Image (cartoon, grey):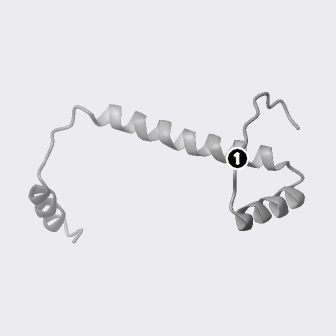
């Protein structure tokens, strides 16, 4: 195992666990390392979403009808 230092119990559906075992064997990584990386990717995406939200917080709000009108006007729908 790499430098992972905290331990948790995670329950998987049997099919998911089987797929993880195969992935681990074929990639020469442990299931823990695969799960750790997947969680990191998910958290990184959340962080990017939060940053995008904070950057756009001062943008003016528009109604749904205004959005539809703008999309039609620009040939998007």
Using the rendered view, name the quadrant where residue 39 is placed: top right
* Tally of marks: 1
Using the rendered view, name the quadrant where residue 60 is placed: top left
Residue 17, image x and y in percent? 76, 60
Residue topped by disc 1: 10
Q: Residues within 10 Å of mark 1 (few under 14, many from 20)?
A: few
Q: Is residue 69 above or below residue 52?
A: below
Front residue (pair 65, 21): 21
Front residue (pair 66, 7): 7
Horizontal side of 42 relative to 5 (left or right) equals left
Q: Is residue 43 above or below residue 70?
A: above
Image quadrant where one finds the N terminus: top right
Residue 11, image x and y in percent? 69, 52
Image quadrant where one finds the C terminus: bottom left
Residue ID at (57%, 45%): 42
Residue ID at (81%, 60%): 23
Residue 13, image x and y in percent? 68, 62
Residue ID at (33%, 32%): 55
Q: Is residue 33 above or below residue 14?
A: above
Residue 49, image x and y in percent? 43, 41
Front residue (pair 4, 52): 4
SS at badge 1 = loop
């Amino acid at each position: 195992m790499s430098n992972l230092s905290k331990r948790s119990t995670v329950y998987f559906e049997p099919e998911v666990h089987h797929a993880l075992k195969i992935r681990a064997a074929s990639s020469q990584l442990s299931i823990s390392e695969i799960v750790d990386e997947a969680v990191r990717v998910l958290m990184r995406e959340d962080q990017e979403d939060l940053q995008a939200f904070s950057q756009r917080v001062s943008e003016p709000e528009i109604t749904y009808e205004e959005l539809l009108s703008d999309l039609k006007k620009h040939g998007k729908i």
